[in-house]
Image (cartoon, rainbow, N blue to C red):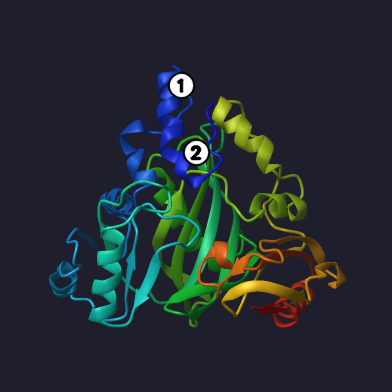
Amino acid sequence: GVVPCREAAVDFSDILGALLGLTCLNDLGLSSARRDKGLMKYAVSNAGLRVAKYARLTQGDGTDVINAVKELELEYPVVVKTPRGMSTMDVFICKDEKEAVQHSATIVRSVGPDGRKTQYALLEEFLGGEEFALNLIASPTTPRGVQVTDIWMYHKIETNGTMVNTYQELVDCHEKKYASLVKYAEGVCRAVGIKYGMAHCELKAKYDEKTKKWVDPVMIEIAGRLAGGRKAILAEATIPGWHPFEALIDAHCGFPVKMPPSFSPSKRAVQTYVPSDKNGILKSVQGNDFERLPTYHASSMLRKIGDKVERSTSLMTFAAFVWLVGDVDEVKRDAMRARAEFKVEVE
């Protein structure tokens, strides 16, 4: 099998697999729908699943925003994004027409994060609710052909015109309150032709106080690859009997995937996003001795002394990531400490 190891390789991997004459590969007719977010929404909608209202914008001056907002009967804020983005790059929450026109024009005239010339900007309705990521394994050897293995709930705040992560926590995918999310994500995976390997589906949902369940899931995007951010490593560390890296290779090679009796985690895992709140050249850092935290599992400093830093607005502009494993209250406490006690000085 050909395994995509990053977002930009998703469509190329299946094409390469076909050229090599392999039989264990995802639907070639939908390869672009696994990468282009406009085609992705079209495929998911055709499968009868709800998607956000959207429009493709191609005008270099961004003026087609005006008619698109009217035709879709949208209200501000709206989302404008690059269609082949990654790591939350070039995603803007626009509070008015001026911002939407500006960001659309910039995207249409630019090169995307994957190094390709952008063909259009994507306008979407702003979805309410909370954001989740559902990771899945796809293989004909599994009972349903595709199955959710772990769910991560995102905790975000709005900063500088975009939604920025504070931390993400692993929850139990077998809990009944997540049942509609699981069913929806598995449907999305099938809709874009993912039959072998891993998938990473991001969506939004609302909590129904009456039923005590998450309802009305709507896709943000799906990627035909292993989740980033050490999610697979933490899933393996907390879900007894689950070995996602072995499962990934087995699925792409057409071998039976070894599934655990349950995907319920024995401990809570958290990825913490440690931001820089300043722009400039990094002069000094305090609070980066993350090993002091009782639930510490791993960490990564993304900037060193002398590097340019900026206020964090996307995944790759954070100063550090910290991964924690332990009891629910303990990991949340340490996540807040990691962020609050981290200080940078710039010049």
Residue 176 visible in rendering: no
Residue 23, disc? 1
**Quadrant location of the N terminus?**
top right
Q: Is residue 40 left or right of residue 196?
A: left
| Residue 275 against residue 82 in the figure, above or below | below
Residue 9 visible in rendering: yes
Q: Secondary structure at mark 2?
A: loop
Crowding at mark 1 (Cα within 10 Å: few <14, some 14-19, many 20+): few
**Quadrant location of the C terminus?**
bottom right
* Residue at (40% x, 63% y) in the render: 90
C-alpha gap between disc 1 and disc 2: 16 Å
User: Where does label 2 land, which residue?
Assistant: 145
**Residue 334: percent from the left, percent from the top?**
77, 76
Please report whichever mark, 1 or 2, sits nearer to the chain's N-terminal start. Answer: 1
Relative depth, front residue between 333 and 16: 16
Closer to us: mark 1 or mark 2?
A: 1
* Residue at (83% x, 70% y) in the render: 289
